Image: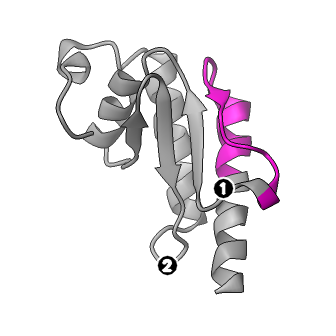
Amino acid sequence: MAEVHAQSLRLQDQFIKGVETRVRGLTLATPRSHLMRGSQVSFRHPEGYAIMQALIAEGVIGDFRAPDILRFGFTPLYVDEDDVARAVSILARIMEYSNWDKPEFKARALVT
């Protein structure tokens, strides 16, 4: 289990670095310290709900927590480095072109 957790932390670090390098407008909400986080990473954005819906529409599954948290889980039994790179690329494109700014992504559902 220690190796699984260590790999989860490596994937999280890859995701954080990728998002902070390539994506404007998101603020890291998760502690940077490995000692202070589990197997997920959260970022803040005022339009977090719509952004998460746009991500889900493109196959990047995370969840939204009110008021503005985009949360992503990293389970190395199912997620690898290529998945993380793909998620960063999709998120970067969604943010660069404001693909989240569509009515279908802003209509609130009970479950995200």
Question: Residue 7 at what x, y percent from top left?
Answer: 68, 73
What numbered label is drawn on residue 12?
1
The residue lying toward the viewer, choosing from 52 and 95, is: 52
Mark 2 Cα-neighbour bin, 10 Å: few <14, some 14–19, many ≥20: few
Q: Which element type, helix, strand or loop, lies under badge 2? A: loop
Question: Residue 70 at what x, y percent from top left?
Answer: 48, 35
Instruction: Give the residue at x 20% y 13%.
Output: 103
Instruction: Give the residue at x 32% y 30%.
Output: 54
Q: Is residue 86 positioned above or below 97 on the image? A: below
Instruction: Give the residue at x 51% y 69%.
Output: 75
The residue lying toward the viewer, choosing from 14 and 6, is: 6
- N-terminal-most mark, 1 or 2: 1
Question: Residue 67 at what x, y percent from top left?
Answer: 44, 22
Identify the amino acid type marked 2: Leu
Task: Name which quarter of the figure residue 24 lies in.
Answer: top right
Q: Is residue 20 positioned above or below 38 on the image? A: above
Q: What residue would you read off at disc 2?
A: 77
Quick check: is 61 in the magenta stretch? Answer: no
Circles 1 and 2, Cβ within 8 Å, touching? The answer is no
For residue 35, side relative to residue 71 (left or right): right
Q: Is residue 58 positioned above or below 97 on the image? A: below
Question: Residue 3 at what x, y percent from top left?
Answer: 70, 84
What numbered label is drawn on residue 30?
none
Please state the extent of the stretch shown in magenta in the rendering: 14-35
Instruction: Give the residue at x 69% y 55%.
Output: 37
Identify the amino acid type marked 1: Gln
